[in-house]
Image: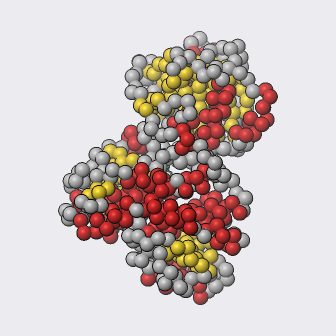
Amino acid sequence: MCGIIACVGSDDAVDTVLTGLKNLEYRGYDSAGLAIQNGTDLIVRKRAGKISDLTGGFARELPQGIAGIGHTRWSTHGPPTDANAHPHTSASGDVAVVHNGIISNYESLRSELAEMGYLFTSDTDTEVIPHLVERYLDAGFDTDGAFRKTIERLEGSYAIALMIEGEEAVRAARQGSPLVVGLHDDAYYLASDVPAFLEFTDEVIYLEDGDMVTVESGSLSITDVAGNPITREIDTVDWDPEETGKGGYEHYMLKEIENQPESLSNTIRGRIDPEEPAIHLEGFPRGCFSDVSEVHFVACGTSYHAALYGARLLEEANVRVRVSRASEFTGRIPDPAGTLVVPVTQSGETADTLGALRQAGVAGARTLAVTNVVGSTVAREADEVLYIRAGPEIGVAATKTFSSQVVTLTLLAERLKQDVDGGDGRENLGTLLRDLSVLPDQIEEVIRTSRAEALSSNYSDRDAYFFIGHGLQHPVALEGALKFKEITYEHAEGFASGELKHGPLALITPGTPVFALFDGKHDDKTHTNAKEAQARGAEIIAITASEGTAAFADEVLVIPDTHPDLSGLLANVQLQFVSYYTARLLGRPIDKPRNLAKSVTVE
Ligand code: F6R
């Protein structure tokens, strides 16, 4: 959802900014640009298309310098054209700005500035920012004063980085959109996300809303909007820069699917003791949820499917639970004192989820974020945080983070069950934890033996694809369909098995593939409904540990036998492969599907 990067004091700002942009391309990829201070001039290069179009188009004329800002865009205001690409500049060209977020009062600011004679050349909300800065410079303010006056006028959300002709400095401000500072010797980096500069430094400062920053070679200052100095802690990030590269894989998505044995091992490390049996969730000891009477999950997209999975586990244990799509959350919580609101979000920056978290806070509920990104806005704003520890995920389609979310929620659900219904939960827990401890090896087995690539080649020419499952397999069916449509661009829908006959069956025609998920516990409805679809010409691809269950199916994708609460994770890996290989056969840009971006920071 747009990525910004800036650097000061690095030997070659162009190289650093371009590296940062490539690392951030998952946040948006419809246009890109940079501005470089070369000692005398502020030089701007930008164009519609991917970063490679920017570097290819200007390869021989990219400027040299030690300070720069860059941007990769996911359009909100105006189509992806050269003119709408960032940086945006003032009429004189002396002010260049990159921005992530939405300036909600841009129309009134634009009219005001246009009336004063400032000429606009793009359709974007961002362009008001350089014109405002210039307006205050023209009125006699110094650079800091002009930037501060500008920030006071903006409404909405923003992470902004700004450069002024003749100054080897970058100024930045944050309100509602992520912005992180990186530090290494005399060099400073500013970015929407840590992976942007991870190969240059692992020392970071997470900025807060209302912070303004100025970086020059060897100097960093952080203030509030009034100019009062602020001290922020320096953190060390423990992500390995190698993790953010493709590591020899053709696509990040394939790398991330095949990384799941490792990422899941990280998720459970130190958290489970199958022999005791016991769960050790850091910060969440036994009894910490004894005042909770209801759990309310809020999430979007794939994270919503993980939340549905967690909710089903709680429901089966008789814990009162609700799940809302974050964008549909009303903020109404009948019993705030007894309700635990759990935003589930990989990035920790999704605007809809953040909005729901804030509403829950206003309603007075206790909030516990389940997220992947340390220092993300959701992690900082929730009362408590439980990290899924999946490591950086770059492919726009979420894969390994879904598995880590589901496993983290499974552990959280066990702790909640113990605290809310008072039982010791030992009966089922030992078996569950034993099966969980070998889950990474079982995923490895699926990766080694999956027939999904061969199977996909038989089915890549169909008009529609359906995914069905009952109980815990229902969210997995929804996730299978979301992944499939997202990267293949083919029509795909996920259904609760029993729902097929209430309407969707009308869509089944001869040859329609129906992926049916079996886990040994919730199978009867899926069996009956898959057969009904088959009787109407559908081809059934069963995903199961029991070939006997699937004897009627046209095709089978086998998964290892495990606890029914974990089976969906193995089935999901098979479905991830089906989506990936179908998209590859169809020649889709798998890591950057059209119209999408990794981190959706606008509502
Ligand atoms: C789909 C996908 C999205 C995200 C959704 C929420 O593959 O990645 O549906 O799951 O945009 O994102 P987070 O989890 O960052 O809140």
**Residue 556's x, y, as percent?**
56, 77
User: Considering the image in quadrants, where does the N terminus appear?
Assistant: top right
- 80 sits left or right of 543 in the view: right
Foreground of the two, 126 or 267: 267
129 over 157 or under it: above or below? above
Q: How many numbered circles are shown?
A: 0
**Residue 597's x, y, as percent?**
60, 48
- The residue drawn where x is 32% and y is 70% is 316
476 over 114 or under it: above or below? below
- The residue drawn where x is 63% and y is 42% is 25
Quadrant of the image occupied by residue 103? top right
The colour scheme used to paint the residues is secondary structure
- The residue drawn where x is 53% and y is 48% is 393
Foreground of the two, 429 or 315: 429
Q: Residue furthest bottom?
A: 535
- 249 sits left or right of 61 in the view: left
- 385 sits left or right of 601 in the view: left
Using the rendered image of the protein, determine whether residue 507 is visible from the camera's viewpoint: no
**Residue 149's x, y, as percent?**
53, 21
Quadrant of the image occupied by residue 244? top right
359 over 446 or under it: above or below? above
Using the rendered image of the protein, determine whether residue 79 is visible from the camera's viewpoint: yes
- The residue drawn where x is 56% and y is 12% is 142
**Residue 55's x, y, as percent?**
74, 35
Foreground of the two, 414 or 453: 453
- 220 sits left or right of 64 in the view: left
